[in-house]
Image: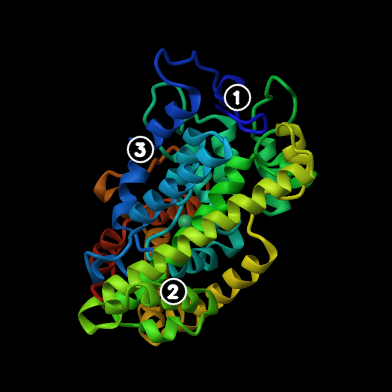
Amino acid sequence: MLAPYACDPARSRGRRYPQNPAPTRTEFQRDRDRIVHSSAFRRLVYKTQVFLNHEGDLFRTRMTHSLEVAQLGRSMARTLGLNEDLVEAIALAHDVGHTPFGHAGQDALNDCMRDFGGFEHNLQSLRVVDVLEQRYPDYEGLNLCFETREGILKHCSLANARALEAHEPMFADGAGGVGARFLLRQQPSLEAQLCNLADEIAYNAHDIDDGVRSGLITLEQVCEVPLFARFCDEAATEHPHLRANASRKRWLYEAIRRMLSAQVYDLMEATRTAISAHHAQDLCAVRAAPPLVGFSQPMVGEARALKAFLLRALYRHPQVVEKMDAARTVVAELFAAYAHKPQEMAAHGLAFEAASPDSLPRRVADYVAGMTDRFALREHERLTGRRLFA
Ligand code: MG
């Protein structure tokens, strides 16, 4: 059922450490299973998406976000004839490199690492699956397929791409590793491109949902966004009782559902058009073409307006900013504390390896990045004697 431009697991470019095929699963199904069983994946359940993990049980965490991206991605992949299992594997792993406390944590860690190569969550997701997961007898990491790894590495600076290439194995086809496409200015598979869009569609929708239910933004405010207002009106015209106070949650859900479907249908249509316009009949043509998975031009503008609204009204809401400032302090002080006393990292028997080939700052960054929100808060309190979140 795969389209000719899809990734075929039987023609995977392979793993860093060659392995015999599994008897009952394709290579990409095997990758998906490895990711689901990893400890980095489990920890996503206690990591912040937008709302700090302990603020409420009903908001998205990185785990539920990743599951929503996987669901959306699989559903779109099926329609486009792409490989669903590969999309699922990439989607479930795409955020495993995130620090505690979301982007605030990543910014703080990047500041701490400024003189030591920086910290970037995307690169860290690849590092988690390539190096930091220690589960197999003969190699580091999960030893995933090239196609899964290239999908996880959504973006990468040229300097980082060169550094990555220096450590990539020589694949049988001689075409370079996961950094090569950044140096050659090529695109990843359609499955990887699709995951980026599924990520964006998912968080735009669920951040409206969480934002309104948290009380930080109102339904009326979101209606400043033309895309959302249209579906809000449409839903209430078809179901006038939704305007009643008691039904406002259903109104919110119905408007989000319609908006999400509209974005998915728009993307299907625009992507099919782009694939045929660029004669992308196989993976080689996909890689050489411009990005093919995307919205139509009008939807690009509408999605941009929605993102701008969420940035202004939700991500920069004073209550969110205040918590994120505190989160930055937690991460910076944790980094300083471990860098000063590395033996503190061994206190919990976690992934701290004294014999690691990496520099101390990199090991500290790996350790802090791997923490859940609540473990970071506990450790911060233990090491500094201060509690920054009531
Ligand atoms: Mg994401």
Q: Which mark is residue 29?
A: none
Name the secondary structure under disc 3.
Answer: helix
Q: Can you identify the residue that label 3 sits on?
A: 36
Mark toward the start of the polypeptide (1 vs 2): 1
Q: Can you identify the residue that label 1 sits on?
A: 12
Q: CA separation, marks 2 and 3?
A: 39 Å
Contact, CB < 8 Å: mark 3 with mark 1? no
Q: Can you identify the residue that label 2 sits on?
A: 234
Nearer to the camera, 336 or 194:
194
Name the secondary structure under disc 1.
Answer: loop
Q: Dividing the image into 4 quarters, which one contains the C terminus?
A: bottom left
Quadrant of the rendered structure where residue 32 is?
A: top left
Residue beneath the point at 76% across and 49% down? 290
The answer, for residue 330, to whether it is visible in the render is no
Tell me the crowding category of disc 3: few under 14, some 14 to 19, or many 20 or more residues within 10 angstroms, Cα based: some
Mark 2 residue type: Glu
Nearer to the camera, 202 or 89:
202
Mark toward the start of the polypeptide (2 vs 3): 3
Tell me: residue 4, above or below residue 369. above
